[in-house]
Image (tube, rainbow, N blue to C red):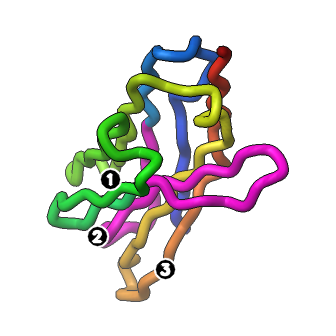
Amino acid sequence: QVQVVESGGGLVQAGGSLRLSCAASGSIFSTGAMYWYRQAPGKQREWVATITSGGSPNYADSAKGRFTISRDNAKDTVYLQMNILKAEDTAVYYCGTDVRDVKGYNYRYWGQGTQVTVSS
């Protein structure tokens, strides 16, 4: 059993910053790539950023230059530092992580999401 829990969302003014965290816990042997997605009201879920197990990041165009993804492998935690936030960044942010469990099986787990609201 693996749990993925996001935190750090909230209300912020346009131009401000937030840092999201996402921790995986449970029967984890190792974590692979970790992801952030978001879903705005009335829109499909969209990819925001990925970080590989080796720490290589990739970003959606909407996140480049403003968001930074990072991870702490010792804590099975991924972060998303969001700067210069815009109203269009308002969404529920979801964390996903690829996990190899103690039995050797690979799965992708998702958190419940954390709300980010940017006021203009």
Q: Is residue 17 left or right of residue 95?
A: left
Callout 2 amino acid: Ser
Callout 3 amino acid: Tyr
Q: Are marks 3 and 1 in contact (CB under 8 Å)?
A: no
Q: Is residue 34 visible?
A: yes
Q: Is residue 59 left or right of residue 13?
A: left
In this view of the protein, which residue sits in the foreground, 14 or 33?
Answer: 14
Task: Please state the extent of the stretch shown in magenta in the rendering.
Answer: 21-48
Q: Are marks 2 and 1 in contact (CB under 8 Å)?
A: no
In this view of the protein, which residue sits in the foreground, 28 or 79?
Answer: 79
Q: Earlier in the sequence, mark 3 or mark 2?
A: 2
Q: Which residue is mark 2?
A: 30
Compared to residue 102, the image places residue 23 above or below, namely above
Q: Residue at x 67, y 16 (%)?
A: 119
Counting from the top left corner in percent of width and height, residue 60 is at 42, 56
Q: Which residue is mark 1?
A: 76
The label on residue 33 is none
Mark 3 neighbour class, 10 Å CA radius: few under 14, some 14 to 19, many 20 or more: some
